[in-house]
Image (cartoon, rainbow, N blue to C red):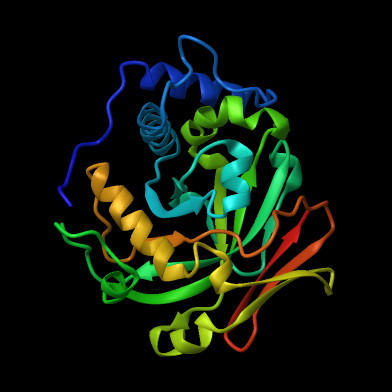
Amino acid sequence: MPLTQRPHWSGAIPAAQELLRQQQEGEVFTGLVEPLAPADVMQAYAAQDCLIDIQSQLRHTSVSGYKIAITTPVMREFVGFDDAISGCVLADMVFQSGHSVAAGKRQHLIIEFELALQFGRDVPERKAPWTADSILDFIACAYPCLEIADDRHAVYAELKRNFFSLVAENAWNHGAVLGVRIEKNQFPDLWQSTGTAYVDGQAIGSGHSRDVMGHPLEAMAWIANHFQQRGRRFKAGQWVTTGSWLASFFPLPGQHLRFDLAGCADVQVQIT
């Protein structure tokens, strides 16, 4: 699989600037309009790259990890796009279990219940596509994870029309909370575990590792191939949230959320 170049689009910078303005002014997500609307997914990623560059400079931070979204057939049919998508997680928005998330600092807060996998070695260029087996050699550990997102009160029925704007807006990511480290020797148990989400101590749903692209390692192989096509490679220490194990949750102030990977680890967050 050849290493290609970072996607380029002449409208990427103004599109990114407009998305940032909309976020800062608290506007409802309606999708970018011509001439700023990306025409395809690679233009959307070009705008996403620019948005992350601008945010990194403004906030004096850098990318710590990445996310995968649109991982299920149901979601792909819903948004009208037959593949997963990726986004970035900036280091100043990565927190440890027990962190408090202020709902008032987001327009419409979303929490997703995920598993993050961390690379222990740099991922080299590879001619053949990455597979679940080949990418495993480069992964050091895992973490239960709560992704912080903000859909800006998007009208979901209109996402098919505005999907490329969602990609450009970094797949709506606004951070992540990482739980207790899961060592690689625990992976056999992890792959068999059920993850259960709790709100104020009450279970609200469960999922399994196979619910995300068939297996978390399949998700990691997907993003390694996806990044190589965009002229990127993972470095040791970077990590990826591999997709939500159950439905997105829209929390309210005062709620306590916990995601428990039975027999492995958990992660918790307080909504204020």
156 up-or-down from 218: above or below: above
Residue at the extreme top: 35
Tell me residue 124's x, y (percent): 17, 61
Please say if 51 is above or below 4: above
Instruction: Say how many tags the image has.
Output: 0
| Quadrant position of residue 122 | bottom left
- Residue 63, compared with residue 146, is above or below; it is above
x and y, in percent, of residue 194 in the image = 64, 79
Determine whether, in the image, residue 55 is placed left or right of residue 25: left
The residue at the point 55 percent across, 45 percent down is 173
Residue drawn at the location 76% of the way across and 50% of the way down: 250
Which residue is located at x 67 percent, y 62 percent? Answer: 246
Q: Name the residue nearer the viewer: 132 or 174.
A: 132
Looking at this view, is 54 or 262 the one in front?
262
Q: Position of residue 154 (x, y in %)?
A: 70, 31
Q: 3 left or right of 33? A: left
Please report the residue visible at 28 percent of the width from the left and 32 percent of the height from the top.
Answer: 7
